[in-house]
Amino acid sequence: MTQVAIVMGSQSDWPTMQKAALMLKELGVEYKAQVVSAHRTPNLLVEFAEGASENGIQVIIAGAGGAAHLPGMIAAHTHLPVLGCPVRSSQLSGLDSLLSIVQMPKGVAVGTLAIGEAGAANAGLMAAQIVALQNTNVRDNIVAFRAKQTETVLANQRLELD
Ligand code: RP5
């Protein structure tokens, strides 16, 4: 059953948002990804967000760029945790996306990640960490991922001139 939903405002967000999908796949979390636009498909947004919990979704990752209202509007329509990913925009390099997502009014929460691919990957990691609270397989995968990451850094810490 799908544990995490990844939604994004446009197909053009996928190169960034697929970093979240890759992280979830690596950590053994079931996910599905689809385009849901706050502005271009507002009715679909409501239908998706209101149905997410009864569809078994535990965490929603929402990415958008520019006037990035998708994460906040999804959060307005569900009690599930929503992680917001600011996608780098062509005009303002994603600062517009970041500020649109992060400045939520008190009482409706979105956990905002960094602009771009690192933020999307960390959204996948954070979503997996939430799922892991009640899933020992995913927890073990996260612990192994972190240990391997540390090992890799320690094995490559000496720098030399070319
Ligand atoms: C936002 O507008 C999307 O999330 C995307 O980041 C941006 C541009 O969308 P396209 O014009 O490429 O479809 O809604």
Image (cartoon, rainbow, N blue to C red):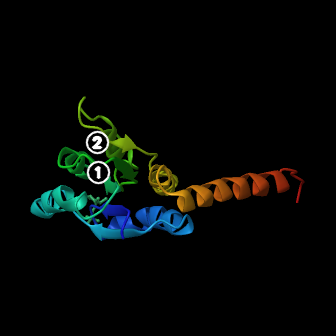
Q: Residue at x 40, y 68 (%)?
A: 31
Q: Is residue 159 left or right of residue 132?
A: right
Q: Quadrant of residue 51?
A: bottom left
Residue at 32% of width from left, 54% of height from top? Answer: 65
Residue with the mark numbered 2 = 100
Q: Residues within 10 Å of mark 1 (few under 14, many from 20)?
A: many
Res 156 visible: no
Can residue 142 be seen from the camera position used here? Answer: yes
The answer to whether 141 appears left or right of 149 in the picture is left
Specify which label sits upstream in the sequence, 2 or 1: 1
Q: Nearer the viewer, residue 103 or 2?
A: 2
The residue at the point 48 percent across, 56 percent down is 128
Q: Nearer the viewer, mark 2 or mark 1?
A: 2
The local secondary structure at tag 2 comes to helix
Q: Position of residue 9 (x, y in %)?
A: 27, 61
The residue under label 1 is which amino acid type?
Answer: Gly
Q: Which mark is residue 102?
A: none
Q: Is mark 1 within 8 Å of ligand 1?
A: yes
Q: Are marks 2 and 1 in contact (CB under 8 Å)?
A: yes
Viewer-side residue, 83 vs 28: 28
Quarter of the picture holding the C terminus: bottom right
Quadrant in which ligand 1 is drawn: bottom left
Residue 59 x, y percent position in the rendering: 36, 54
Instruction: Please name the residue that numbered disc 1 is placed on.
Output: 66
